Structures are given as C-alpha cells and as structure tokens.
Amino acid sequence: MRYMIPALTVFSLFFIIPNISSFYFAFTNWTIFDLYSIKFNGLDNFRRLINEDAFKKAVINTLYFAVLTTVLKNILGLLFALGIHKQSKPNDFIRAVLFIPVTISTLVVAVTFVAIYNPETGILNTFLRQIGLDVLAKRWLVDIKYAMTAICAMEIWQWTGYSMVIFLAGIKSIPDDFYDAAKIDGANLIHTLKNITIPLIMPSINVSLLMTTILGLKVFAQVYATTNGGPINATQVIGTFMYKTFSDGFLGYSSAVGLVMTLTILLITLLILPRLRKMEVEY
Amino acid sequence: MTVKQIKRKIPTLIMLLISVIYLVPIWLILVNSFKSVSEANLLGIGLPENFKLHYENYIIVFQEGGIVRAFFNGVLEAACSSLIIILFSSLAAFIIGRRQNRITNIVYYIFICGLIIPPAFVPTYMSLRLMNLLDTYTGLILIFTAYGLPISIFLYTGFLKTISRQLDESAFLEGCSPIRIFYQIIFPLLTPVTTTIFIFCFVGAWNDVMIPMFFVNGDKWALPLTLYKFKGTYGTRWNLVFADIVITILPLFTLFVFAQRYMIDGLTAGAVKG
C-alpha cells in the first residue's frame, strides 16, 4: 500500500484538494489585495457572472470553438487518414509532415498565425488577392465577424494531424480479409467505407471526438496569444476570461469562472461518453 | 502507366499537395528569420533579397532573448516532472494492478477522475502559496507531476495486466522482496510505456502555456513561453521574432526528426492504446 503514497500525496495536494476547495472559493469575495480575509458571499459571484457581457460572449465563443474545431478536425483527419492509410514512402512522409504542428507549442503557432493573418501583407491575403479573390481577403484577427473563425482555422491546422494518427491506428487494425470479401461481393468505395471502415474504427473516432471536444473547451493560448479576447471581447473565451479575472486579482470571482468551466467540461464529457460507447460495433 | 495506376495515385497526390500547404507556415518562419527587418516585416514567403542571409538575427536573439536560461528552465521542469511521474505512477500502478481490492480500486478511480476533470487553477494558486512554493521550480514541477499522474497510472495499469503474474510469484518464492521484484523484474518490462509516458509528459510540460503563466514569473518560463515575452519587446521586428521561433521549435523538431515513431506514439498516448 505504501507504494501508492507518493503519487496519492502529490495528486491530493495539487489536484484533489484545490478542486474540492474551488467549491468553497467560488462562493467568496476572496481577492489578491486582502488574501487572508476570505468572506462567504453566497451567489454574488455567479450573479455578477450572469450579468457580465464578456462572460456571456466567452461561453458562446468557447462552445463555438469547441464544436467547429471538433467537427472539422475529425472530418479532415478521417479524410486524410483514408488518403494515406496504405503503407508507402510518400505516405510516411505526409503523415510526418501533418504531425509536425502537434509538436509545436500552441503559443508559437499563434504568434506565427498573427503574421499569416496580417490584413495588408500576410500570406493568406496576398494569396487570395493573387488568385483574384480580393473579396475574401478579410481583416482576419481584427474584424469581430471573422476573428473567432480565424482562430478556429489555426487550431484545425495544428491538430488535424493528431486525429489523423488516431484514425490511422484504427484503420491499420482492420483485417484485410474484410476488404477482400467486400471486393468479391462487388462493394464500391462508398459501401466499403460505410459498412466496414467507419463502423470498425468507431472506437478510434470516439476517442478522437472526446479528446478534441475536451481540448476545444479548454481553449486558452490560441486566443491569448492572438487577440487576447479582443476586439471588444469578440474572441473572449472562458479560459482567457478566467485568466483576466485572476490577474486582475479577483480570486473568488475567478474561482467561480473556473468552477463553471470544470462543471461544463465534466457535464459534456459525461453526456457524450455513453452515447459514443453505444455507437461501437463488433463484427 | 495505365489509367488505373494513375487513378490509384490520386489520393497520395492530393495529400502531397496538402502537406505542401502544411509546410508553408514552417517555411514562412524559416525564411523570414534570415531577412532584414524591413523585408521580414512584409511577412512574405519569398527568398531574402539578393540571397543575403542575415545570420545576425540569431546572434541578437541569443543576446537579448534569454534563450539559454529558458532552454534550461524547460529541460529542468520537463525532465524532473516526467521522471517523478514515471517513478511515482509506476510504483502506484504496480500495487493497483497486482493487488486488486477495495482500496486499490478506489485509488484507481480517483486517478481516472483526473483524466476527465480539468484542474482548478485559482485554488491551486492558494495551495502553492500556503506551502511557500509559489514562483518556485519545485512548485511548478510538482504541479506538472500532479497533472501527469492520471494518464500515466492509467497506461501503466493497463500494461501491467498484460504481464504474467507468475513472474512475480516465482521471484517471490525465490525470496525476492516486493520492491526488488518491482525494480528488477517489472519496471524493465514496462519500458515501452515508460518511453511513451516520458515523451508525453516531457513535451506537455515543455509546451505548456497556462500552468507557468499562473504559477511562476517570467524568469522561470520555458522556451515556447518566452517567445510571448520576446514578441512583446521586439514585436515590430519580425525577423527577430521568427529567429526566436526557429530556436524555440528546434529542440522538439530535432527530436521529431530522429525519433518520429516514438514522438507520434508518445503524443497520442492513451488515445491509441486506451
């Protein structure tokens, strides 16, 4: 038993106890200016949250980011995986290239995309103008209409390779006999995909969906290093809002934001997990 | 080549085109890091004017960017936390996997909850403060350790179940103590998972943004985060920013080139095996 003590001690001190105590701190007026006088203030923090425009925007943007990136990362990841699932030298190279962004810190990716999205000389708009699509050359991170979507696109560039690798592992585990049998029965590509590949890689799809959803809900650095929530809160997400209230010194209030985030992630995970499990099949 | 053969190559060709698009941002970083200020600020992807490479950008970044300190910060924090995670979680998983009773089951589920529940940053700030660990390397390393334990215990416990119990039993009958069974017999057999966990935790800590921002000051940040500080100061000189980015991504990129399979396995830990 004593072998479990080191792990349990560290985990309790820095994870369990803080998580439990957030249920207390979220209901207090705790600030950094008067650290040791913490007073219970009931639902004040939550009332303030509901009335704060920036927080409403943050919730909507976080959900928008999570849904849009989850859907596109998985669809593109699956298409990419199907495109390169056969073992060959070029395919190995492509797999490596698409995985490179995963190894780069989100913050570095964000700074790079600030350059790419530059409205005047950034390569995205330069390219769009060159092929005659001037109308599409928007002020990406500056225009409140496009800023959030532009950040989503950046995230999709970075993480699609991750989902792709998960799908590739799933596809690899399907026995060749299945495809041979389908060929003899005269199944075309769509049939094979719908009746063999997709159902059999359902466990991989579920893992990827779950991971991308949680990652999406935890969005922080992507926004912090590009727009930091601006212009006028148009890209505020829960993560940046929590950091803002924390660095402003309102610790109790910030705890309340954190608690909302924790409960949202927990709720969504517990909601989709059993549904995903039901979609798995065995042949 | 027959039509059929060409048709079969189409997916690969499309994917090659996509990987070229994927490489554009990387190329943008690399080429602009060698340009002069006025040229780099145009943010284009053309070659430097007259093919003149401005190496001095790198020298300036080395002098001004605090690169060496940030590099060793990252190595220290990422390596220490990964090693502690491996030590603590393999020990715990050894008991959880081998002695299945009510207590070990409860402990296992506590750690599994940590896979789903995100950490509570603000109360953790208070914990660190009370322990006098705020803005210290020790505090940061212990936070990384705590956040990495669930996935490692999950992976180790899963792998331990595939190792035959007869090994332990025969060693025990030979008079081997449990701790020796663990580090002489079991731990070496866990090596594949240990590599995976090491890469997963090391890269995670190295690239993390939120945790160092919450709990330590800028002088203890690892390379990727210092880029943010650097851009704050030199944001109008993109040649320097890009040179800083190249230096920042170079360590993990080198690792990726030489140990690609391990990196991919490591970073998708749990996703593929779980």
Image: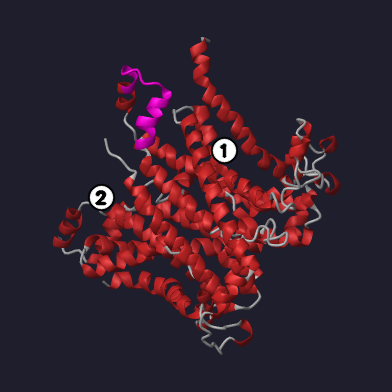
* Quadrant including the N terminus of chain A: bottom left
Q: Which residue is mark 2?
A: B162
Residue A122: give x, y in percent of width and height. Answer: 76, 43
Residue A48: give x, y in percent of width and height. Answer: 60, 75
Above or below, A240 against A151 in this view is: below
Nearest to the observer: residue A230 or residue B11: A230
For residue A152, side relative to residue B34 (left or right): left
**Tag 1: residue type?**
Val
Q: Which residue is mark 1?
A: A97
- Identify the chain of the residue marked 2, using the numbered disc in the image: B
Task: Identify the disc placed on residue A11.
Answer: none
Query: Which stretch is magenta?
Result: A182-199
Specify how the rendered protein is coloured.
secondary structure
Q: Secondary structure at mark 2?
A: loop
Q: Residue furthest top?
A: B2
- Identify the chain of the residue marked 1, using the numbered disc in the image: A
**Is A198 one of the magenta-colored residues?**
yes
Above or below, B250 against A16 in this view is: above
For the stretch drawn in magenta, the main secondary structure is: helix
* Quadrant including the C terminus of chain A: top left
Residue A117: give x, y in percent of width and height. Answer: 72, 46
Q: Residue at x 13, y 61 (%)?
A: B173
Residue A121 visible in the picture: yes
Q: Secondary structure at mark 1?
A: helix
Residue B46 visible in the picture: no
**Tag 2: residue type?**
Thr
Q: Residue at x 85, y 35 (%)?
A: B50
